[in-house]
């Protein structure tokens, strides 16, 4: 019987009241998301804006590098793609999003 009374006494004990409330529990999660934004999302947005600005500034005669590693010279700019000359008498149309870097501006 004493074991049964011990079990009842254990169950009858009140749980300790939570301290800090809702704000104390949510603050670490909010800080985690803020740190994630400033360490990961904001730099990626800045890099994407710089890439978009570079794509808008490209013109005929510029030498570029594609995401596949092909170097070429822009011969024509269309709405959604560039025409690249990658060798003598070899022209390739490449989507604007597949240009990764500017190798050299025309006239430099």
Image (cartoon, helix red, strand yellow):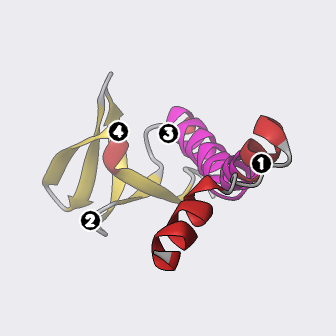
Compare marks 2 and 4 and give the one earlier in the sequence: 2
Residue drawn at point x = 54 percent, y = 37 percent: 52
Q: Are marks 4 and 3 in contact (CB under 8 Å)?
A: yes
Circle count: 4
- Would you name the residue on which mark 2 appears? 68
Q: Whole-Å distance between the Cαs marked 2 and 4?
A: 13 Å
The image quadrant that residue 69 belongs to is bottom left
Residue 100: percent from left, percent from top: 43, 56
Q: Of 40 and 18, which appears nearest the observer? A: 18
Q: Are marks 2 and 1 in contact (CB under 8 Å)?
A: no
Q: Of 31 and 82, which appears nearest the observer? A: 31
Q: Of 53 and 34, which appears nearest the observer? A: 34
- Would you name the residue on which mark 1 appears? 18
Q: Whole-Å distance between the Cαs marked 1 and 3?
A: 55 Å
Magenta span of residues: 29-56
Q: Does 100 sit left or right of 75 as displayed?
A: right
Q: Whole-Å distance between the Cαs marked 1 and 4?
A: 56 Å
Instruction: Judge whether 71 appears above or below 15 on screen.
Output: below
Instruction: Judge whether 2 appears above or below 34 on screen.
Output: below
Residue 86: percent from left, percent from top: 24, 60
Most distant residue in the right direction: 20
Compare marks 1 and 3 and give the one earlier in the sequence: 1
- Would you name the residue on which mark 3 appears? 55
- SS under mark 4: helix
Residue 47: percent from left, percent from top: 61, 50
- Would you name the residue on which mark 4 appears? 96
């Amino acid at each position: 019987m004493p074991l049964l009374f011990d079990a009842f006494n254990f169950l009858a004990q009140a749980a300790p009241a939570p301290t800090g409330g809702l704000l104390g529990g949510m603050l670490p999660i909010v800080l985690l998301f803020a740190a994630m934004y400033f360490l990961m999302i904001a730099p990626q947005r800045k890099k994407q804006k710089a890439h978009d600005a570079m794509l808008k500034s490209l013109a005929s005669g510029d030498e570029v590098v594609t995401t596949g590693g092909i170097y070429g010279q822009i011969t024509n700019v269309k709405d959604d793609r560039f025409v690249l000359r990658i060798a003598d008498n070899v022209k390739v149309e490449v989507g604007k999003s597949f240009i990764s870097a500017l190798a050299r501006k025309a006239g430099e």
